[in-house]
Image (cartoon, grey):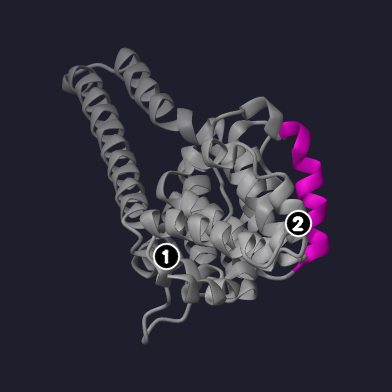
Amino acid sequence: MPAKPTPHFQPPTPEQFDAHLQNYPANPPSKWQTRTPLLIAVALVCMSIVMTGPLSTILPLVALAWLFGHTSFRTRRAFALEAQVRRTQEIAMLRRYPEALRTGWKYLPQTVPAPMLHGQTIAMIAHCLDTMGCYDAAIVGYDYLLHRLPPGQPIAVHIGVSRAAAALGAERLSDADDSIRRLRGAVEAYENTPISAAYRLVKLTQQVRTHHFTEGIHESEGLVEALRPLGVDAGYGHALMALCHYHSTDADPITPNQSAKTWWEQATLLLPPESLLQRFPELAPLTELA
């Protein structure tokens, strides 16, 4: 469900998001950085072997204490960062998108040494921008991830579908069509999953945005089941199908409106009308059917 920016909050522009990503790319520690603490501890132990006197006894203990303390500090810091990323994702799941976006933006630089957390944070930021209607900025994040993920992996396919939806939202219809065509084969491997459901919704959105309403109706068989993995967000698909029937010129003047009303009622059982209109303003005529 899209969320409007708060009065005192301005989401980043595509240029700002791109600059933020370029300034803080993932940069995991090198093998030498990872091994340095152990090497220092080994060096101290070796020094104790060749030395005599009290230091030969103390140095091994110092080495172990330093290694334990350093490892413990790094572990606590990693767990704290992971917990922060998880909390930010939970805020986004609660649909508090401006807050999640601000928090994710703030913590992205800290995730640089952890590529997985870094990618999760970028995906969350892009999702927040997408749901807030900042489609061009969201595409910047999606493209950044797609260029770094192995093609065909579930997360890459899911992000690809999200990018196609964002392109439709930005009215980049040719771009969206290219993305949808490329994804067709990859999505087939994820039947009856949120990925296939999101792809079906994107296809329906494309048909509506290109005014192929009759085509949308002809492909409506099994739509309810196909969209079910989306949960309440399936309401967007029901509303778009209602719009297809509303604008259909293939049937008599009465049947389309009755079918449109039925689909619209199903949509509003899942999502409030204001949420549907916020994401798809073209649904406005359907409010007259209530």
> Which numbered disc flags the more N-terminal residue, 1 or 2?
1
Residue drawn at 59 percent across, 42 percent down: 223
Up/down of 43 relative to 265, above or below: above
In the image, taking residue 52 as reference, residue 144 lies left or right, namely right
Q: Which residues are magenta?
A: 172-186
Up the image or down, 176 lies above or below 7; here it is: above
Lateral position of residue 152 relative to residue 270, left or right? right
Query: Which disc number belongs to residue 101?
Result: 1
Q: Residue at x 39, y 31 (%)?
A: 37
Q: Secondary structure at mark 2?
A: helix
Residue at screen point 53% across, 59% down: 239
Q: Main secondary structure of the magenta part?
A: helix
Query: Horizontal and vertical percent for residue 191?
Result: 61, 28
179 in the magenta segment: yes
Crowding near the residue tagged with mark 1, few <14, some 14–19, many ≥20 C-alpha atoms within 10 Å: many
Front position in the image: 238 or 106: 238
Q: Which residue is mark 2?
A: 214
Q: Is residue 159 visible?
A: no
Say if the magenta span includes residue 143.
Answer: no
Quick check: 231 left or right of 58? right
Indicate the amino acid at tag 1.
Leu
The crowding category of the residue bearing disc 2, from other C-alpha atoms within 10 Å (few below 14, some 14 to 19, many at least 20), is: some
Observer-nearest residue: 284 or 288? 288
For residue 81, above or below residue 42: below
- Whole-percent x, y for residue 192 in the image: 56, 29
Q: CB of mark 1 within 8 Å of CB of mark 2? A: no
